[in-house]
């Protein structure tokens, strides 16, 4: 996502068996490191719903959740 020299990353739910840049199940937010401070937009309802279903966030996604104030 984003444009040339302006990357914006999607935060997605993916099956661990899928390749890193492969198929994903759902987009739950975005992350833009180019702004000051960094912009993190996560859909809290989707995050909580997927975690309740058994999804395990990566370390980086845990940091983004902490920045936005979503506690597990």
Image (spheres, rainbow, N blue to C red):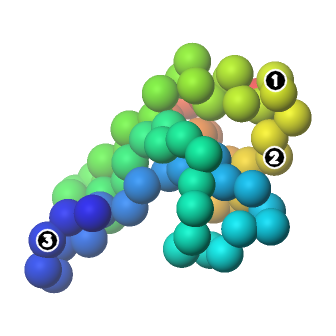
Residue at screen point 67% across, 54% down: 14
Secondary structure at badge 3 equals: strand
Mark 1 residue crowding within 10 angstroms, few (<14) / some (14–19) / many (20+): few
Task: Give the labeled residue for mark 1.
Answer: 52
Instruction: State which quadrant residue 29 falls in.
Output: top left
- Give the quadrant of the C terminus: top right
Residue 67 lies, in percent from the top left, at 51, 42
Between 39 and 56, the residue placed more toward the observer is 56
First along the sequence among labels 1 and 3: 3
* Extreme residue in the front direction: 23
Residue at screen point 27% across, 63% down: 1
Residue at screen point 38% across, 61% down: 9
Mark 2 residue crowding within 10 angstroms, few (<14) / some (14–19) / many (20+): few
Alpha carbon of mark 1 to alpha carbon of mark 3: how far? 34 Å
* Extreme residue in the right direction: 54
Instruction: State which quadrant residue 51 falls in.
Output: top right
Residue at screen point 50% across, 51% down: 11
Relative to 53, residue 24 above or below: below
* Extreme residue in the bottom direction: 5
Secondary structure at badge 2 equals: loop
Q: Is residue 49 left or right of residue 9?
A: right
Alpha carbon of mark 2 to alpha carbon of mark 3: how far? 30 Å
Task: Give the labeled residue for mark 2.
Answer: 56
Task: Give the labeled residue for mark 3.
Answer: 3
């Amino acid at each position: 996502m984003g444009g040339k020299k302006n990357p914006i990353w999607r935060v997605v739910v993916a099956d661990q068996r899928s390749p890193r840049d492969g198929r994903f199940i759902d987009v739950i937010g975005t992350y833009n490191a180019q702004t000051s401070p960094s912009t993190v937009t996560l859909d809290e309802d989707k995050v909580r719903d997927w975690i309740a279903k058994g999804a395990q966030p990566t370390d980086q996604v845990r940091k983004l959740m902490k920045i936005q104030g979503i506690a597990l």
